[in-house]
């Protein structure tokens, strides 16, 4: 009788190890998924705030700064400063191997500085890479990245 209890106890210890081996991948996914969602929401919030700060800067610029054209047909210098504001705020995130894209728009087109816009828009395109569950999230995102596109638009106050 005593001998059969010891054998049963040793047999049960092996089954616990097998159950743990089955549950470990599920537990890892259950831990990694909230971390990924938290990271995505954090990156989106920072990018949205950066876009809002840049559009607020553009909207409050005086008309002389807005009308100053860039050298050689490039964007206005004030748009370059707004882009630098966004890039400086996003640089703290270390978003990955590819740099985020920033579009500065005046009335839906590029800000060349030839006219005073009615509306200014800052659009950020930022990819997020999942280092932990990249193989699983690529099934849902269609690639190896999650693309965030925060946009901030406001009226130009100099009109």
Image (cartoon, rainbow, N blue to C red):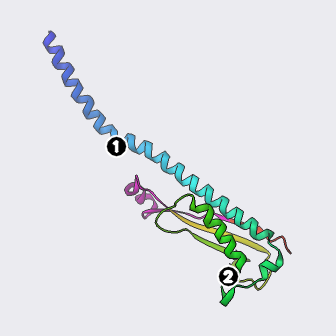
Magenta-tinted stretch:
128-151
Q: Quadrant of residue 47?
A: bottom right
The residue depicted at 54 percent of the width and 49 percent of the height is 38
The image quadrant where one finds the C terminus is bottom right
Please name whichever residue, 145 or 113, is drawn nearer the observer in this view of the structure. 113
Residue 62 coordinates in the image, percent (x, y): 83, 74
In front: label 2 or label 1: 2
Q: Is residue 143 left or right of residue 106?
A: left
**Residue 144 versus residue 23 in the image, above or below:** below
Rate crowding at label 2 as few (under 14), some (14 to 19) or many (20 or more) other CA atoms within 10 Å. Answer: some
Q: Is residue 20 left or right of residue 27?
A: left
Q: Which residue corresponds to mark 1?
A: 25
The image quadrant where one finds the N terminus is top left
Q: SS class of the residue under badge 1? A: helix
Residue 115 coordinates in the image, percent (x, y): 79, 83
**Residue 120 versus residue 29 in the image, above or below:** below
Rate crowding at label 1 as few (under 14), some (14 to 19) or many (20 or more) other CA atoms within 10 Å. Answer: few
Q: SS class of the residue under badge 2? A: loop
Q: Which residue corresponds to mark 2?
A: 75
The residue depicted at 51 percent of the width and 61 percent of the height is 95
* First of labels 2, 1 by sequence position: 1
Q: Is residue 22 left or right of residue 109?
A: left
Among all residues in the image, which is located at the extreme bottom? 72
Separation of marks 2 and 1 at Cα, in angstroms: 51 Å
């Amino acid at each position: 009788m005593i001998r059969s209890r010891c054998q049963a106890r040793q047999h049960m210890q092996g089954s616990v190890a097998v159950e743990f081996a089955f549950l470990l991948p599920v537990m890892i996914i259950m831990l990694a998924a909230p971390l990924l969602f938290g990271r995505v929401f954090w990156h989106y919030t920072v990018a949205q705030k950066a876009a809002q700060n840049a559009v607020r800067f553009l909207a409050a610029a005086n008309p002389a700064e807005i009308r100053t054209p860039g050298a050689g047909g490039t964007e206005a210098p004030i748009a370059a400063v707004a882009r630098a504001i966004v890039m400086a705020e996003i640089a703290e995130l270390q978003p990955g191997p590819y740099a985020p894209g920033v579009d500065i728009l005046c009335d839906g087109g590029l800000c060349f500085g030839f006219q005073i816009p009615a509306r200014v828009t800052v659009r950020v395109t930022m990819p997020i890479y999942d280092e932990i569950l990249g193989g699983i999230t690529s099934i849902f995102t269609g690639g190896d990245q999650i693309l965030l596109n925060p946009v901030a638009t406001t009226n130009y106050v100099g009109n």
